[in-house]
Image (cartoon, grey):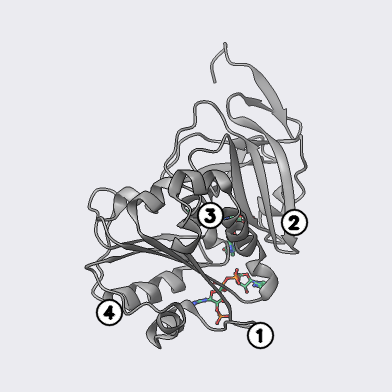
Amino acid sequence: MTDQMPVTTVNAKTVTLPDAQTVTHVRHWTDRLFSFRVKRPASLRFRSGEFVMLGLMGDSGKPLLRAYSIASPAWDDELEFYSIKVPDGPLTSRLQHVREGEQIILRTKPVGTLVLDALLPGNRLWLFATGTGIAPFASLVRDPETYERYAEVVLMHTCRDVAELDYGRKLVESIRADDLLAELIGEDFADRLRYYPSTTREPSATMGRITDNLLTGKVLADLAIDGISPDKDRGMVCGSFEFIKDMKAVLEGFGLEEGANSDPKHYVVEKAFVGDGI
Ligand code: FAD
Ligand code: NAP
């Protein structure tokens, strides 16, 4: 903290600006999922797909922060986040009650592996998400650079129930209706974004885990894609530890190799949350 910096209060605790950001919009999707937007700090530069630390002041007087993927694209003048509500979660049991006009704490040091630069050039980008793991991809599918780099983008999102797919469905609808993106990327871009939602516990038009739908060839048949190969396909994976572990095996089976910011290859992974004991 420096003497010159102005201060503000976040749930009655003093915070040094520029860490406090005002919430501009909140939307509840289900009883365990919500999204919110905040003003973007002028100092924040990030690459679509990265995450930041955000939170509220804890009862101890120290910030209570968690990792959150930025769900809005790098060009947006607001930041969007898509969040779980963990009933007894230290942060989200409180964050889920945040309202427009209130403030949260946001650290402006973005990091992450789900960035375009961590992949070798290719023809088709696969985005594999379960649950809130769609958040970093909500950023990437709204970024014109994604379509400059790839002829085709396939977003696979799987949740237990139909209602949990709503955020992704609305996202894709809004992208396809976005005239500015069409102007920037080309009128055909709506066809270049392929969307493949599925559920695993509640009946819906497309059922099944992402891993199973890849291994059985169902998704390839449904989208008329003739195969996945390291020559042209690139992948990004975001979900639970178990999902990532199983997806790695599937992608390695197709011959793809895992890359990183410092060593771009065919696919990259990032946990959507740290589970119990992991
Ligand atoms: P915590 O004590 O953090 O978690 C309690 C338990 O809840 C965990 O052990 C786990 O079993 C479960 N849990 C936590 N987060 C999730 C989740 N997202 N989905 C399903 N179960 C979960 N969370 C988001 O909601 N949106 C994001 O964009 C997001 N991005 C992340 C990016 C990274 C790199 C990492 C590591 C985590 C991310 N998380 C995200 C998880 C987030 O950091 C917190 O764990 C979450 O906000 C819950 O905080 P909490 O303090 O309430 O509970
Ligand atoms: P999740 O358990 O990771 O499941 C999200 C989706 O990923 C589901 O469709 C699931 O399919 C699929 N999946 C899980 N592991 C996979 C793997 N190894 N390979 C491929 N696909 C995989 O995440 P979540 O639903 O967000 O739940 C997170 C936590 O919240 C869990 O502890 C859960 O008990 C708790 N919770 C969830 C709900 C809910 O309605 N989603 C409600 C209350 C509490 P399967 O269905 O086949 O596992």
The answer to whether 62 appears left or right of 73 in the picture is right
Q: Nearer the viewer, residue 173 or 137?
A: 173
Residue type for callout 4: Gly
Q: Earlier in the sequence, mark 3 or mark 2?
A: 2
Q: Earlier in the sequence, mark 2 or mark 4?
A: 2
Name which residue lies at 63% across and 16% down.
Answer: 6
Image depth: mark 2 or mark 1 in front: 1
Residues under labels 2 and 1: Cα distance? 23 Å
Mark 4: few/some/many CA within 10 Å (<14, 14-19, 20+): few
Residues under labels 3 and 2: Cα distance? 17 Å
Q: Which mark is residue 203?
A: 1
Residue type for callout 2: His
Q: Earlier in the sequence, mark 2 or mark 1?
A: 2
Residue indicated by mark 4: 253
Q: Is mark 4 within 8 Å of ligand 2?
A: no
Residue indicated by mark 2: 28
Residue indicated by mark 3: 138
